[in-house]
Amino acid sequence: MDTPNTTSSAAVQLRMIEALGRRLSANQPDAAETGLIETHISWILLAGQEAFKIKKAVGLDFLDYSTLEDRRFFCQEELRLNRRTAPELYLDVLPITGPAEEAAFDGRGPVIDYAVHMRRFAPDGLLTTVLERPLPADLAAALASAVAGFHQSLRRGRGSSLHGLPEEIRNATSEVCASLSALVPRADSQHRLRDVSQWIEAEGERLDCVFAARRQAGRVRECHGDLHCGNIIVREGRVRLFDGIEFSASLRFIDVIDDLAFLLMDLQARGHAPLANACLNRYLEATADYDGLRVLRYYVAYRALVRAMVELMQAHGAGAAPERAERRAATYLDIADRQRGPGRPALVLTHGFSGAGKSSLSLALAGHLDGIRLRADVERGRLFGVGDASQPDKYSAHASEATYEQLAHLATLCASSGWTALVDATFLQRTRRARFHALAGELGVPLGLVDFQAPPELLAERIRARMGRDASEADLSVLRSQIASADPLGEDEPGFVLPYDATRPLADAAQRAPWQPLLAHLCPAREARA
């Protein structure tokens, strides 16, 4: 609820905003360069290349900007937190001096408010807008790199020990479900919400020990907290995260996978599920946080329910529930509903020599499978270093055995968490394939293999072209050794084998048709619906 002094503070602030707007307009030769954006908790004054964000004097259930001291503190927090990811955008905190009718930034009168001074950016750089155009080829990698780099830069602080408790996580989800039940207008949506609410409550209880273990392992950190597509800027291949949550420690001291889940959910809601999957895979390769797969579906469902709640609350606050808000809420509810399935884990192996394009092609296949790619080159580098001459030969029998053992461990983790594991390795030796054939049997999941085929001269050409630009450090000598020692696929080996012509254009892999026989084998019911 609003605090008692909100009305008078709001009136003063409105006069202050009008005065600041006049002052900024007078200093701009082009009136089109000035403007005002208003949200339910702030105003943003635009002037030329600058922006000034001012917090409204409100006290709500989830934040309190009621007093001048509150607003000063949270402006400083906003500056501190967002400089971690977008230092060039967040410049300073400026006092606003009065009286309100003569308000100025850092003037000579008494301080009546504060503003976050920012560098203005063009709205066409927002990820929400970028997604409406043809997507840059490296967008998934750029997004994942930015989020993973941010998360890896965070350390456990004092707040981490106060938040992220299992009961706090479950209570937050229960509150969202309760709020939604009073907002969802249609009977069919009510039934779906009830099913999702029951699942997410049971899932929260099942994951109680996992939440606690991840918190103990330091996965709860001071994150962004509001990582949707509208809070990400993409410019010339550079990604900047901005507008993180400053007003609530409990909403930003969260599991890093919860932070990522918001972005993945929002990409799915905007019709970019393959991009979400590629972003997830790139993130996991960068962080090695495959354990997070155990809780990812829970957090995706939670974030979807939160967005459904926000859509309907905003519509109700406007005095009605427009059809657009109901449609968007239904989209989010559908995403939450999809998380409650048990998953259809499977094990898929790649087969082929270095240079066949397995990694690029398998990432596209992972998008069709909604699966997790486990890349031998990445895990080999994690175990034995990247470009380090002091390390043992990374392609020795010992190194390869250790790499395949790690891949088997990660594949087990993925499948036991309900995900399809796509193991990107050469699998040229029958004994290594047999190890994973047995693993599929132990896990009770369907098995598939994609046989990537290309002529030796093309393999050599690709290896020469990628040297120094890829996680793989296999050179021409490794290729020659592979060709000399490879065991051909045997007709008696188990699993479905899909031959793939790796000379065909990479763009073909984005289509379902080349993969359809494999997809139908792994999940015939889903392919029949598709």
Image (cartoon, rainbow, N blue to C red):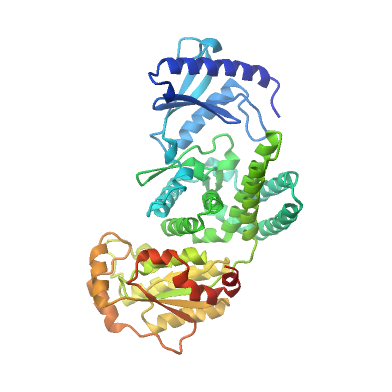
Res. 445 visible in picture: yes
Res. 112 visible in picture: no
Q: Position of residue 398 (x, y in %)?
A: 34, 75
Residue 521 appears left or right of 120: right
Residue at point 51%, 10% (across, down): 102
- Which residue is at the front of the view, 60 or 525? 525
Q: Position of residue 511 (x, y in %)?
A: 45, 65
Tell which residue pokes out farthest to the bottom in this image. 492
| Above/below status of 38 relative to 204 | above
- Which residue is at the front of the view, 407 or 491? 491
- Which residue is at the front of the view, 171 or 8? 8
Residue 198 appears left or right of 519: right
Q: Position of residue 216 (x, y in %)?
A: 56, 53
Q: Quadrant of the N terminus?
A: top right
Residue 423 appears left or right of 461: right
Q: In which quarter of the image is the C terminus?
A: bottom right
Picture quadrant where residue 498 is located: bottom left
Residue at point 63%, 24% (across, down): 66
Residue at point 64%, 41% (across, down): 310
Residue at point 69%, 26% (across, down): 2
Give the tally of numbered discs.
0
Q: Where is residue 437 in the image (x, y as percent from the top left)?
A: 48, 81
| Above/below status of 186 relative to 113 | below
